[in-house]
Every structure is written in C-alpha cells, then in structure tokens.
Image: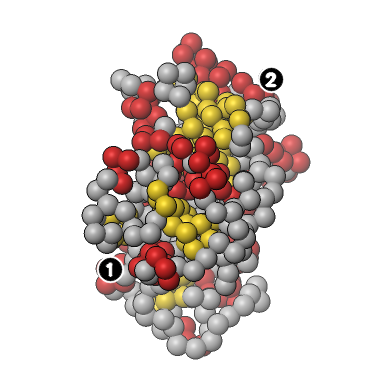
C-alpha cells in the first residue's frame, strides 16, 4: 500500500507543484483533455498517453490528445516510477503499454524536450466490496436493468460516451456529477454500478465516493471499464452519437448493414453483409491491431445485429458497436441517408498521423532518380550502424540525434519538402517535429522500411 500511495503521489505531483504546405506552428497542449477532469499541470510537465519507444535514439513519444510529443532521455538520469519494474531502465520503459496514462517532467533546450521523470499512472485500488467484475456485469446486462435490478452509469465525458458504451448504461460524467444527481434512483439501497476508461481512470471511483456521500449503500465500480468490456462484448451507439462522433469528424469506421433492402438508403460508407456470412466479410477487414471502429446496423438494433457484432468481437476486434434502435432509429432522427447499391468490399483507411506522408507517395518520390526529385529532399535519420547496409539513392543522411547540430545541412526553403524516414517511423517523426518547429516544410514516413545496399527498399 505504501508503494501504491507513493506512485499516486508521484502521479499527482503536478497537482500541487497539392500540396505539401508547411503546417502552422500553434501552441501545443500540455494536458490531455480527459486528464483535466482530475488534474492540473504545472510548467515543465506533460500529461497524456504513452505512444512509442525508440531505444536507438533514447527517445519516446506520447500523445496529448491529437498532438504528439517526442522526448529524449538520458539513461543515466531518467527516473521512471511504475508498478511494473524491469531489470533495466529499457525493460521498464518497454513495459509501458501504448495508450497508458503518464505524467512526464522535462527540461527544454533549443526546442528539444528531455524527460527527467516518467510517472506511469497506477491502477485504481478499491476495497473488494466496492468493486464488481466483468463477468458479473455481463450477466446483469444480459438480464437488463428491470430483471437484474441495477443502474449502470458511464462516468466518462459525453464525447467518449458517444463513441460507444455498455448496453443499458446512462451517461453521468463525473465532472458534472453534482448537476446530474436526478439521474440516480430514489432507492438508496439500489445497486449502482459506475465505470469509466479502465484500471487507471479515477472518474468512476470519484462517482462512487460522491454516491456514498449521498447515502447510497450498494454502489460499486467496474474498475476494468470500457476497455475490458470491448475485449469480450459489443457496445452500443445512439444514431445521433454516431453522426456527431464519427461522421461529422470524418473519423473512419467500418459500417456493416445487414438489411436486405439497404439499397433504398443507408449510412455513409456502409458495406453489405448477409447474416450468416460474417466470416467471409472478416477476410476483408484490416488487421485487428489497427482497432478499426465497427458499427453493425440492422432494421431495429435487434438480434441479427447483436449476433454479427459478437462474431466480429470474437474474431479479435475491439470497439465493435450496434446502432441503437437500428436503421429505424436513424431514419426517425432524420439523419442523412445515402441511396444506391451498397459496397460489398470493406474499405478502411486509418486517419493518418499529422505530418505523415502516405506509403504510396513516399514510394513514388523515393523511386525517382535523385535529379528528378525537384523540390523534395529525402532525409534518412537512422544511425550509422543501420545506414551502412544501404540508403535510398540521393538521400541526405543525418542521424536524428545529430540533426539539431547539423541543421545547416538541410535546405530551408518553403518550396523544398523534407521527407524524413528511419526504420520504423518513430525517429522520423521526432525529426519531423524538430524540423517543423524550426520552420521547415516537412513530412515523415510512419512505417517500417528496409533498405538494401543497391538503394532498393520495401515498406511494410
């Protein structure tokens, strides 16, 4: 318990204390929006989600909402506070899962941030009688609130709820809890269940504490929350929520329409599926690790949609949802329809990372003879032990760790596009951010690339 309390103290530390036109440089957020519900952030700190680790350049990436921060670190001085300790510093850093909440203390010199401390947010600790398991929640949801005699509340902010929620849940965001107490039942002995974004999220425990203060005696927290639910089950999305969370924001999703008469009108981008043939359609799905959002639509959000959604979940895809009320609810809400024959092939293109160049466009540019690459410079930021095996013909080679001191070698002209690459995309993105902050017109390849001694290359 002392160790856990220390971790929480470290984590909370800052509470008390076409065209390839250059992107405009804007002030970057230092705290993910969801973190603002419980924390403030002092200068020299960042709060967000761990993204990727580049051991070769002693650097890592973290996401602060839609922005990417790249930080270097000194192995001799970096301090990592985590419940999962490895034998070495590298092992401890490698144990941090992608998407895990972190707080980072850093120093900054000449536009380069160097991390001095990484505090990995610890899991929430509650007494056993205050928690409820995934298995128990699944059984209750299967029965429904009336038969199961429960009230299920999603403590996440409304934008997260709109992206999908556990069936039968009511949104009661923790930051607005005091204004929404009328959503709670009159019976203070009723079973209340709160959940949020997972083991490290403090919003559902916060809701529990507030409910207990109001006199509720049978309130519990589903600590594993939405991530655990999605790993085994489908969620639901209301029609208006899907429009606002996905269509209006142009966020790619796979929409599967099961209706035989869907040609008369359907949702934008929908693909046809005959119930019973899910396995055939799954062969066209992108790999599961891309975690594509999936929406299953039938006439009324009934058994056919639920069955197909669960089949997709069992195939390893998290983030699968059923359209609540089905197409009838979509139509009743007067939401936009697309007429015509439905697609029979799944097309899913993930939203590219800001500043990235497509694999196809990089391949086109890199395949040109150096003299044909007008106004384009390919910058290889790999280390010497990597570049000795081969480089793209005509590429400028500067290791990412030396880029700042050798910037004079990189032409600074608004008409010149500098395209960085490494072997995985991590150091290339670090170099991209450095160049962008220095006013360069830059892009980066966010992919694994292998180059042989002839200059030929393959992109995975």
| Disc 1: CA contacts within 10 A as few (<14), some (14-19) or many (>=20) | few
Relative to residue 378, is residue 212 depicted above or below? above
Identified at 36% across, 77% down, the residue is: 345
Mark in front: 1 vs 2: 2
Give the Cα distance between marks 1 and 2: 52 Å
Q: Quadrant of residue 69?
A: top right
Q: Is residue 99 visible?
A: no
Residue 334 percent coordinates (x, y): 66, 76
Q: Nearer the viewer, residue 430 or 321?
A: 430
Relative to residue 30, is residue 439 depicted above or below? below
Tell me the element at label 1.
Answer: loop
Residue tagged 1: 283
Identified at 66% across, 43% down, the residue is: 28
Q: Tell me the quadrant of the picture where the C terminus can be found.
A: bottom left
Q: Is residue 46 left or right of residue 233?
A: right
Which mark is drawn over residue 8?
none
Identified at 32% across, 40% down, the residue is: 384
Q: Is residue 38 left or right of residue 419?
A: right
Q: Nearer the viewer, residue 46 or 114?
A: 114
Tell me the element at label 2.
Answer: helix
Q: Nearer the viewer, residue 125 or 169?
A: 125
Residue 31 percent coordinates (x, y): 63, 37
Residue 139 percent coordinates (x, y): 40, 46
Which mark is drawn over residue 16?
2
């Amino acid at each position: 318990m002392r160790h856990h309390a220390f971790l929480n103290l470290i984590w909370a530390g800052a509470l008390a204390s076409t065209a390839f036109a250059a992107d405009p440089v804007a002030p970057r957020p230092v705290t993910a929006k969801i973190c603002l519900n419980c924390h403030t952030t002092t200068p020299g700190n960042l709060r967000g989600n761990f993204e990727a680790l580049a051991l070769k350049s002693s650097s890592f990436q973290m996401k602060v909402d839609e922005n990417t921060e790249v930080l270097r670190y000194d192995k001799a001085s970096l301090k990592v506070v985590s419940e999962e300790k490895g034998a070495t510093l590298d092992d401890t850093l490698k144990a941090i899962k992608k998407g895990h909440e972190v707080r980072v203390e850093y120093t900054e010199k000449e536009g380069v941030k160097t991390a001095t401390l990484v505090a990995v947010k610890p899991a929430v600790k509650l007494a056993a009688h205050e928690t409820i398991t995934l298995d128990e929640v699944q059984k209750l949801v299967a029965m429904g609130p009336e038969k199961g005699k429960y009230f299920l509340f999603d403590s996440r902010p409304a934008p997260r709820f709109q992206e999908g929620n556990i069936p039968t849940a009511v949104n009661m965001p923790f930051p607005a809890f005091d204004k929404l107490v009328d959503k709670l039942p009159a019976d203070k002995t009723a079973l209340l269940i709160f959940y949020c974004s997972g083991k490290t999220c403090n919003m559902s425990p916060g809701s529990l504490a507030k409910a207990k203060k109001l006199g509720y005696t049978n309130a519990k927290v589903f600590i594993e929350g939405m991530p655990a639910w999605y790993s085994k089950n489908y969620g639901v999305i209301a029609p208006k929520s899907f429009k606002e969370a996905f269509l209006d924001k142009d966020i790619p999703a796979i929409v599967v329409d099961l209706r035989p008469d869907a040609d008369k009108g359907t949702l934008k981008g929908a693909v046809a599926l005959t119930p019973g043939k899910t396995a055939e359609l799954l062969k066209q799905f992108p790999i599961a690790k891309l975690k594509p959002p999936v929406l299953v639509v039938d006439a009324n959000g009934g058994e056919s949609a639920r069955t197909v959604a669960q089949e997709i979940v069992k195939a390893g895809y998290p983030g699968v949802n059923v359209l609540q009320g089905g197409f009838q609810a979509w139509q009743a809400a007067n939401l936009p329809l697309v007429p015509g024959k439905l697609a029979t092939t799944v097309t899913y293109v993930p939203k590219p990372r800001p500043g990235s160049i497509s694999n196809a466009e990089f391949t086109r540019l890199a395949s040109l003879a150096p003299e044909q690459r007008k106004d384009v410079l390919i910058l290889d930021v790999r280390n010497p032990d990597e570049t000795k095996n081969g480089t793209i013909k005509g590429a400028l080679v500067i290791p990412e760790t030396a880029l700042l001191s050798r910037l004079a070698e990189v032409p600074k002209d608004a008409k010149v596009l500098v395209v960085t690459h490494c072997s995985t995309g991590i150091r290339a993105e670090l170099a991209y951010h450095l160049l962008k902050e220095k006013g360069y017109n830059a892009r980066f390849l966010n992919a694994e690339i292998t180059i042989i001694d002839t200059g030929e290359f393959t992109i995975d």
